[in-house]
Amino acid sequence: MSLLIETLPELAVFGGAPAFAEPKHVGAPNIGNRAALMQRIETILDNRRLSNRGPMVREFEDRVAAIAGVKHCVAMCNGTVALEIGARALNLTGEVIVPSFTFVATAHALKWQGLEPVFCDIDPVTHNLDPARVEALITPRTTGILAVHLWGRPAAVKQLEAVAMRHGLRLMFDAAHAFGSHLGGQPIGGSGDLEIFSFHATKFLNTAEGGAVVTNDDALAERVRLMQNFGFVGKDQVVALGVNGKMNEMSAAMGLTSLESMDEFLAVAHRNFRAWQREVASIPGLEMKTGGPDVSTNHQYIVVEVECHRAGLSRDDLVTALHAENVLARRYFYPGCHHMEPYRSSPPTGGYQLPQTEALCTRVMVLPTGTAVSLADIARMGDLLREMVGNGPEISHHLRMREKEQQT
Ligand code: T4K
């Protein structure tokens, strides 16, 4: 082992100093103009209007609807509640077909509403639902499809709409990652019955916590709005069952401020994506895929697939080595929802058949980007990855030895 330390002095996994003094996160928030935010907060405080669809929320809804190219936007306290209310407003019952390769909120939102998520495999190139496999999973109990535009890459919208139409199913899209993405020149937001956005801190456009339901369906928008405000019409008339899913004015102030910098956030995301592409292109065993020819994504996630045999080490060992350098790469969306509770304890008859999902869960790592990450940071991280892949077997051997030592 002393030989390794001599030949690889710089890598922190072998005991060297971390390349970064401060952690480089996936999902460090983009922050807009502070003075503009403070000014909005002053206005909120002066007006003493903190919530219940105040002026900031109304303006935010109008701006989001315009960018998404839809008639209606109902701002929500977060993306998960937007999913739950969306599913309820569509009167979904029984089974809903959904990918397993997604953040667990997609599946939980359905289960929390008493629905049964039926996990479907994905296209290995786009990482999104495979429409042919969706169709094969439809049963008499299926009432809907919940597709995800994963990583902001648009799902196979047209094909999924055709499947839903053929079988009389409702179709909703989890567009938590996809605000600002486009398909065929159209902004993501107006497909299926409804779509939802997340404006969580880690999204490229954030309201600290927040989300939205967007739709072109007037009646559906009305139902969603009732459900997110206890079913109230006016001040003392309740006409439906509802919850509290409202966005507050402080979050909307953050959102409006973020929107003013949206072009800059997008430009940085695209710049960083291109820089990461250049780095990754020269590293054997690493690959970055794009969303296809008629697709423009917001590039808020840098998604790299690691092919263990060519890279000389596994995705997990690479992530461990990166963490030692203070590069906090993530294994999104490992291990897949179907391996998480409560889903893993009640598999369908014959078990889950998700080979593409299983494979991707061992290959994908997500790397830092956003306005907190500079081109110099990316160049340094690229050098680290090159050095790690160049010494893959040594790193793996070292980590196995370390594990053995820890066990004894
Ligand atoms: N559907 C999909 C497909 C989703 O990806 C999500 C959320 C949802 C639905 C639900 O939307 P929300 O209900 O969340 O609006 C994070 C986010 O919490 C989650 O919003 C997001 N997807 C998911 C992909 O990522 P974690 O568990 O990875 O979060 P966490 O706390 O580890 O944060 C990631 C990194 O970001 C941290 O390492 C540090 C950094 N960070 C985070 C926060 C919150 C900061 O630097 N500052 C911060 O304020 O889930």
Image (cartoon, rainbow, N blue to C red):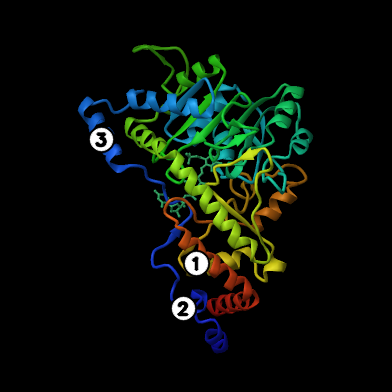
Name the residue at 23% across, 25% down.
47
The residue beneath circle 3 is 39
> Mark 3 falls on what kind of element?
helix
User: Going from the N terminus, do you reach mark 2 or mark 3 first?
Assistant: 2
Q: Are marks 3 and 1 in contact (CB under 8 Å)?
A: no
* Mark 3 vs ligand 1: CB below 8 Å: no
Give the amino acid type for the residue marked by disc 2 in the picture.
Gly
Q: Earlier in the sequence, mark 3 or mark 1?
A: 3
Residue nearer the viewer, 113 or 234 = 234
Query: In terms of image quadrants, where is residue 285?
Result: bottom right
* Residue that appears at 42% across and 54% down: 372
Quarter of the figure that contains the N terminus:
bottom right
Q: Are marks 2 and 3 in contact (CB under 8 Å)?
A: no
What's the residue type where badge 1 is placed?
Answer: Arg
| Number of numbered discs on residues | 3
Image position, residue 312 (x, y; %): 68, 71
Q: CA distance from mark 1 to mark 2?
A: 15 Å
Q: Earlier in the sequence, mark 1 or mark 2?
A: 2
Viewer-side residue, 90 vs 326: 326
Residue displayed at 51% across by 64% down: 379
Residue 51 image point, x, y percent: 32, 27
Label 1: element kind: helix
Question: Residue under circle 2?
Answer: 16
Q: Answer few, some or many: residues within 10 Å of disc 3's Cα (few below 14, many 20 plus, some between 14 and 19).
A: few
**Distance between mark 2 and mark 3 Cα atoms:** 46 Å
On residue 380, the disc is 1
Q: Position of residue 311 (x, y in %)?
A: 67, 68
Query: Which residue is more in the foreground, 18 or 320?
Result: 18
Mark 2, residues whose alpha carbon is within 10 Å: few (<14), some, or many (≥20)? Answer: some
Q: CA distance from mark 3 to mark 1?
A: 37 Å
